[in-house]
Image (tube, rainbow, N blue to C red):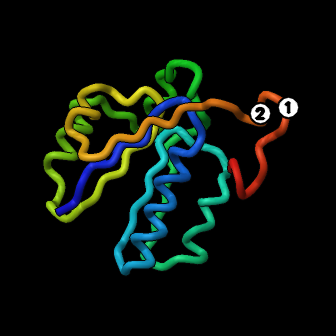
């Protein structure tokens, strides 16, 4: 049986947690599709397919809009869908499909159907000291 995992909150590590779980799944012989809906930039994880069989990654979007609402152009580029569509897709999946959802401000409807919910809370981050994002760590 596949379960629904949610990693949410303002802290760092949501995508990293999903990637770690994906690595573990691939190493156990499972197939992984990793879709990124608001990360239209070059991240190191896009190279995973060069190193791992049974791992597919695709980005839907043109840039991040984490701190602002998506524009109509973002919605079209990301092929964004509403919570009801996400819930229907989760409900209609094959029973052995595991679903991992990441992002800030997970809707209550998603949290309520999830089997595992982890909230990432930022307590301290070196960004506040002016340290730029580092390849292989933040991107």
How many numbered dots are placed on residues in this image? Answer: 2
Which sits in the foreground, 11 or 58?
11
Question: Given contact means CB atoms under 8 Å apart, are the residues at marks 2 and 1 in contact?
Answer: yes
Helix or strand or loop: what does disc 1 sit on?
loop
In the displayed structure, would residue 50 be above or below residue 6?
below
Q: In which quarter of the view is residue 80 placed?
A: top left
Which sits in the foreground, 93 or 22?
22
Which sits in the foreground, 17 or 86?
17
Q: Is residue 44 left or right of residue 25?
A: right
**Between marks 2 and 1, how big is the CA–CA gap?**
5 Å
Q: Quadrant for the N terminus, please.
A: bottom left
Q: Position of residue 44 (x, y in %)?
A: 67, 58
Q: Residues within 10 Å of mark 2 (few under 14, many from 20)?
A: few
In the displayed structure, would residue 17 be above or below residue 109?
below
Residue at horizontal 44 percent and vertical 29 percent from the top: 75
Q: In which quarter of the view is residue 12 placed?
A: top right
Q: Is residue 38 left or right of residue 118?
A: right
Q: Residues within 10 Å of mark 1 (few under 14, many from 20)?
A: few
Q: Position of residue 134 (x, y in %)?
A: 78, 49
Q: Position of residue 139 (x, y in %)?
A: 68, 50
Residue at horizontal 84 percent and vertical 38 percent from the top: 131
Q: Which residue is mark 2?
A: 127
Farthest front residue in view: 123
Q: Position of residue 135 (x, y in %)?
A: 76, 54
The label on residue 130 is 1
């Amino acid at each position: 049986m596949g379960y629904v995992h949610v990693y949410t909150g303002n802290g760092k590590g949501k995508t990293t947690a999903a990637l770690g779980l994906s690595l573990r799944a691939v190493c156990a012989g499972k197939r992984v599709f990793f879709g990124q809906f608001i990360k239209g930039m070059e991240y190191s994880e896009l190279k995973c397919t060069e190193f791992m069989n049974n791992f597919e990654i695709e980005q839907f979007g043109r840039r991040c809009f984490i701190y602002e609402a998506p524009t109509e152009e973002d919605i079209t580029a990301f092929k964004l869908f509403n919570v009801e569509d996400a819930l229907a897709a989760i409900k209609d999946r094959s029973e052995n499909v595991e679903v991992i959802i990441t992002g800030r401000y997970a809707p209550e409807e998603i949290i309520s159907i999830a089997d595992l919910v982890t909230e990432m809370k930022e307590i301290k981050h070196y960004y506040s000291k002016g340290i730029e994002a580092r390849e292989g760590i933040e991107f």
